[in-house]
Image: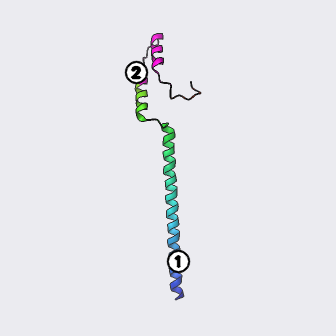
């Protein structure tokens, strides 16, 4: 009878240890996913992709000329609302 209790106890102990390992793995996996989403938001800047595309199109449409009128026109069409206060 003692052998039977001993084997049941070891089986239950093994199941508890395996369950703790699985729960720990799920916890760390969830943290890694959360950190990667945070990193994506930091890299992306949190702006909408359509705004990024329109800004890229504006940059591509700027003149390559170096005369004063072209530079003034490019400067007036540049959107500076997303610049940090240090850059303004």
Crowd around label 2: few <14 · some 14–19 · many ≥20 (10 Å): few
Q: Earlier in the sequence, mark 1 or mark 2?
A: 1
Q: Is residue 9 above or below residue 73?
A: below
Mark 2 element type = loop
Range of magenta residues: 58-80
- Read off the residue under disc 2: 61
Q: Is residue 81 above or below residue 73?
A: below
Residue 84 is situated, as x and y percent measured from the top left of the image, at 56, 29
Taking the image as drawn, is residue 67 in sight? no
Residue 81 is situated, as x and y percent measured from the top left of the image, at 50, 26
- Read off the residue under disc 1: 10
User: Residue farthest to the bottom?
Assistant: 1
Indicate yes or no whether the magenta region holds residue 59. Answer: yes
> Which numbered tag is attached to residue 45?
none
Residue 83 lies left or right of residue 70; in this view the side is right
Residue 77 is situated, as x and y percent measured from the top left of the image, at 45, 19
């Amino acid at each position: 009878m003692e052998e039977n209790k001993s084997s049941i106890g070891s089986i239950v102990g093994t199941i508890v240890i395996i369950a703790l390992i699985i729960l720990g793995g799920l916890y760390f996996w969830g943290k890694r996913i959360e950190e990667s989403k945070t990193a994506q938001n930091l890299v992306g800047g949190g702006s909408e992709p359509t705004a990024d595309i329109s800004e890229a199109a504006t940059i591509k449409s700027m003149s390559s000329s170096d005369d004063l009128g072209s530079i003034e026109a490019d400067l007036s069409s540049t959107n500076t609302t997303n610049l940090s206060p240090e850059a303004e």
